[in-house]
Image (tube, grey):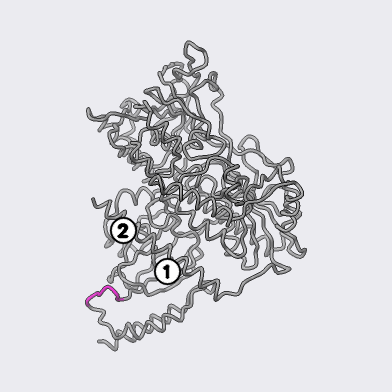
């Protein structure tokens, strides 16, 4: 069991190397953390266990990172220095919609309930979907392992731009 | 209670993020290769140190590792409407200043405050000194109502009123008379609701914000108990966003004073609305239903289907005592819904009238194209029409609407377009440009002394020091001369 998990984790850690080439973060750090992960029990969901999350940025570039349970997805993007332009402008205070992320439906359905103030901000977000949440309000939990979250695509500005729903 | 816990939690994580991003800055400064003013690096000038300017600079620095970006700002202090527009009780929105500060401190970015582009230096001079110039100077004017009595005492533009409580040097003498019980705000955008909220908020809540001490003193003596927010169209066309309405609904000791007749037929229309509009409308309807409590000492309310026709003067002929409104009906549908006068008039008694019908950009320089009708610099995706090497972002690009994320995205777009043009050879990078070196030399010969970012940080430190003794995050300096004295000390 333990060895199978180890293989799994290592296989996943290689994914982490397929990060955006423009990212400045030293990805090699994943390799250092992987063996440590293997020696830990992943079954009790201890607070320092790692969860694999895939981020797809505005340009469609995927970054895969191991994150600590209990961190918000905004924390993750900042800490891991992921290449997402303008993410988290208000720094997680529910005053903007720039940490908007789109979830897989199966994951979205299991997320903690949304508060009105978050929906208020989401209503101003570009590219709002039925499975949108603000990254600052979603805390990483063990069951999320392997999930993919997407940043809405950049607006294709050849045919003029849609304003945020907000202002008019 | 849950909300408080959440806010405390968020505060904790904000600090964490802040520390972290600093750590990364250090890391990249040590580990990265510093790009000095290489012969081939593009030099870009950004006109205006507000959110549009800073977001444009941020994206340019990121997208071109060899770009050198200089931001010129008229005032000695940066951040534009984040400092002078965002309401004092919205400190969360001002967190963007942390990112702007990182941009200003970037090794390839410089901030030059106290430079009035168009007067101290022309756009032509900037274009000669830089490979590209981005106009991000915003909208410093306001649309006027064009009605008789607009100049009477007691009538203010929201832009000036907001500038007054936010410490804009040019508005420090405004001193509005708040002795009247009713205030009327014309326009129903977020600025209108900011003003309404500041007028009705308990002073105890405001005194912990960065609102200026002199406006706090005037607000403490305010008699305003009722604020009506007037719009020419109906609830389904309202321009504000839900957050601001929710804040009105949640104001302590303040009830809603609405006209149920304004909401006739709205319930039936709800089901076909997109979610944001639907939720906003439902919240307003909830406020109508809850109305006013006997305990409420103050009230606020929307007044729909009304256009101002005249400010009514008192016996002295100089002071406003009311406003005459024309009642409207709606014609058309969707975004094209128009307000058409029914011929009926209505007078509202009030001693304070604030017109909040929009900001407006001015032309900066006769050599730059300007569309007087839309009050923007005409452009295609940020490329200024009929020019090369000239770009625009923010409110001069698309008009004065939207939230900070709107300006962020539009500034990123302009920066991307500019970088594309550099790569495609549309912007000629084969010639060396002197950049700030030439401009600062020129400014010196004209007796203009700049305020650099470290000098702004002296002003910042002084403001924070003054604020601390008052239990506020900062006490803004109101006088440009005083700012300069501290900056250059």
Q: Is residue B327 above or below residue A101?
A: above
What residue do we see at 25% from left, 87% from top? A1
The picture places residue B56, in percent across and down from the top left corner, at 58, 55
Q: Toward the viewer: B341 or B14?
A: B14
**For the residues tagged 2 and 1, is the chain the same?**
no
Q: Is residue A54 above or below residue B175?
A: below
Whether residue B410 appears in magenta in the rendering, the answer is no
Q: Which mark is residue A79?
A: 1
The magenta stretch is A44-49
The picture places residue B458, in percent across and down from the top left corner, at 54, 53
Instruction: Single out the mark in the foreground, 2 or 1.
Output: 2
Q: Toward the viewer: B34 or A57?
A: B34
Q: Is residue A151 above or below residue B136?
A: below
Residue that protrudes farthest toward the front in the picture: B489
Count the numbered circles shown.
Answer: 2
Query: Circle 1 — which element?
Result: helix
What residue do we see at 40% from left, 71% from top? A54
The residue that label 2 is drawn on is B9
What residue do we see at 69% from left, 51% from top? B390
Q: Quadrant of residue B142?
A: top right
Q: Quadrant of residue B421?
A: bottom right
Chain under label 1?
A
Q: Which mark is residue B216?
A: none
Q: Is residue B163 left or right of residue B65?
A: left
Residue that protrudes farthest toward the bottom in the picture: A3
């Amino acid at each position: 069991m333990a060895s199978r998990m180890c293989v799994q984790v290592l296989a996943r850690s290689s994914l982490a190397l397929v990060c955006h080439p423009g990212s400045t973060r030293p990805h090699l750090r994943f390799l250092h953390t992987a063996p440590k992960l293997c020696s830990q029990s992943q079954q009790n969901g201890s607070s320092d266990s790692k969860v694999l999350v895939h981020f797809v940025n505005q340009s469609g570039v995927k970054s895969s990172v191991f994150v600590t349970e209990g961190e918000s997805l905004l924390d993750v993007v900042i800490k891991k220095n992921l290449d997402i332009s303008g993410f988290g402008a208000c720094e997680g205070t529910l005053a903007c919609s720039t940490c908007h992320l789109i979830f897989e439906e199966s994951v979205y359905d299991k997320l903690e309930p949304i508060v009105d103030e978050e929906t208020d901000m989401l209503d101003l977000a570009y590219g709002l979907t039925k499975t949108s949440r603000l990254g600052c309000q979603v805390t990483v939990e063990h069951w999320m392992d392997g999930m993919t979250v997407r940043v809405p695509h950049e607006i294709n500005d050849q045919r003029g731009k849609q304003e945020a729903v907000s202002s008019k | 209670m849950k909300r408080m816990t959440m806010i405390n939690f968020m505060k904790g994580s904000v600090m964490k993020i802040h520390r972290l991003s600093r750590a990364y800055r250090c890391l990249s400064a040590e580990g990265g290769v510093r790009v000095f003013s290489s012969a081939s690096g593009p030099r870009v000038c950004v006109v205006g140190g507000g959110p549009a300017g800073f977001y444009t600079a941020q994206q340019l620095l990121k997208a071109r590792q060899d770009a050198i970006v200089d931001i010129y700002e008229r005032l000695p202090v940066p951040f534009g409407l984040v400092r002078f527009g965002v309401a004092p009780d919205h400190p969360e929105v001002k967190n963007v200043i942390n990112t702007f500060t990182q941009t200003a401190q970037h090794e390839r970015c410089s901030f030059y405050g106290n430079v009035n582009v168009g007067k101290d230096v022309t756009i032509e001079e900037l274009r000669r000194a830089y490979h590209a110039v981005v106009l991000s100077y915003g909208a410093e004017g306001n649309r006027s109502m064009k009605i008789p009595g607009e100049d009477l005492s007691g009538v203010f533009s929201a832009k000036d009123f907001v500038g007054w409580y936010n410490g804009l040097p040019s508005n420090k003498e405004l001193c509005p008379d708040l002795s009247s019980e009713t205030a009327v705000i014309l326009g129903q955008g977020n600025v209108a609701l900011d003003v309404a909220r500041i007028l009705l908020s308990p002073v105890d809540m405001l005194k912990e914000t960065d609102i200026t001490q002199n406006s706090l003193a005037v607000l403490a003596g305010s008699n305003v108990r009722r604020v009506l927010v007037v719009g020419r169209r109906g609830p389904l066309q309202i321009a504000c966003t839900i957050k601001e309405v929710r804040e009105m609904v949640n104001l302590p000791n303040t009830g809603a004073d609405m006209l149920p007749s304004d909401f006739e037929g709205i319930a039936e229309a709800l089901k076909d609305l997109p979610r944001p509009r639907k939720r906003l409308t439902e919240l307003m309807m909830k406020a109508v239903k809850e109305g006013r409590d006997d305990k409420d000492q103050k009230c606020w309310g929307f007044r729909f289907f009304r256009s101002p026709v005249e400010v009514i003067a008192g016996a002295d002929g100089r002071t406003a005592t009311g406003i005459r409104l024309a009642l409207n009906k709606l014609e058309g549908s969707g975004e094209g819904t128009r307000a058409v006068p029914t011929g009926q008039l209505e007078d509202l008694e009030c001693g304070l009238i604030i017109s909040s019908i929009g900001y407006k950009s001015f032309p900066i320089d006769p050599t730059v194209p300007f569309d007087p009708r839309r009050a923007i610099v005409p452009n295609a995706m940020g490329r200024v029409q009929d020019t090369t090497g000239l770009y625009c972002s923010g409110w001069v690009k698309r008009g004065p609407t939207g939230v900070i994320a709107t300006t962020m995205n539009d500034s990123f777009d302009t920066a991307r377009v500019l970088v594309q043009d550099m790569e495609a050879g549309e912007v000629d990078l084969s010639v060396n440009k002197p950049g700030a070196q030439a401009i600062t030399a020129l400014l010196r010969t004209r007796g203009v002394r700049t305020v650099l970012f470290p000098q702004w940080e002296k002003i910042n430190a002084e403001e924070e020091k003054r604020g601390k003794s008052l239990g506020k995050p900062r006490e803004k300096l109101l006088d440009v001369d005083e700012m300069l004295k501290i900056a250059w000390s």
